[in-house]
Amino acid sequence: MDALPVPIVLGSRSAQRLALLRQLIPEDRITVCPPRSSDEQEFDGLRTWEEIETRLQDIAREKCTDVVEQCQGRGENCLVLTADTTIVANGKDHAIVLGQPPEPDWRETAKFWFENYLLGKTHRAATAVCLSELSGKRIERVAVSEVTFSSNAGHLLEWYLDTEEPRGKAGGYGIQGAGSVFVTELKGSLSNVIGLPLKEIWEMFEELQVNWR
């Protein structure tokens, strides 16, 4: 690895991930290059946490492979960073993945999730991260946070849905925004829930001997 850190290519369309990464790295060292396709593996049929964690890491890895190929084609020298975040709730006898509420029925879906899986309960927010050199050396992590929602905030649900913040958000809420009014406890990383676990990413940089200090 060069003494001066090479640029970081963020393989994501998420403005939140870009804003978080800028907290660690100078803005002029970051380039955004999303995967060529937005299609990715689903979580259908997965019922255990172990299966979900494996699939989440597979998705982040596939994104990374796509972006690495794009960078190699342009002859760039860089590191590629990709991530995928999901919310995992507890069903009666199995884990339930709460992705982004699908259009056009996002409101009904988010309301159902809140009433059945979120309010008064604890769920997991998991982000799989993949950091790769173009040579093929790759580091992977899965960060997990536990978020507890109030059982006494149901009267705020219609107001929250009216904000339309649940649209496009894993789990149907944004903890960095108005969705924070439901949260009574957070165990683990806040940045992980938003979409990019900064502590784990910093440790991955150190493992590849990238020093941004």
Image (spheres, helix red, strand yellow):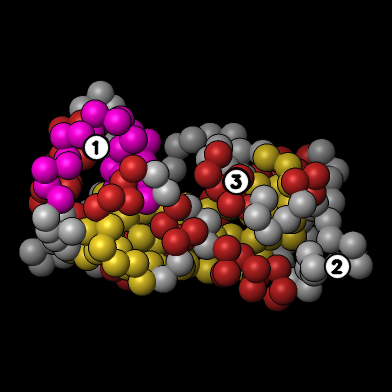
Query: Which region is colored magenta?
Result: 153-175
Q: Mark 3 or 2 closer to N-term?
A: 2
Instruction: Count numbered badges in the picture.
Output: 3
The disc at residue 19 is 3
10 Å crowding of disc 2: few (<14), some (14-19), many (20+): few
Res. 93 visible in picture: yes
Res. 59 visible in picture: no
- Residue 87, given in percent of the width and then of the height, sits at 32, 55
Image-quadrant location for residue 100? top left
Taking depth in this image into account, of 127 and 157 the one nearest to the observer is 157
Quarter that holds the C terminus:
bottom right
Q: Quick check: is 194 in the magenta stretch?
A: no
Amino acid on which the number 3 mark rests in the picture: Ala
Q: Mark 1 or 3 closer to N-term?
A: 3
The disc at residue 1 is 2
Q: Position of 100 compared to 106: left or right?
A: right
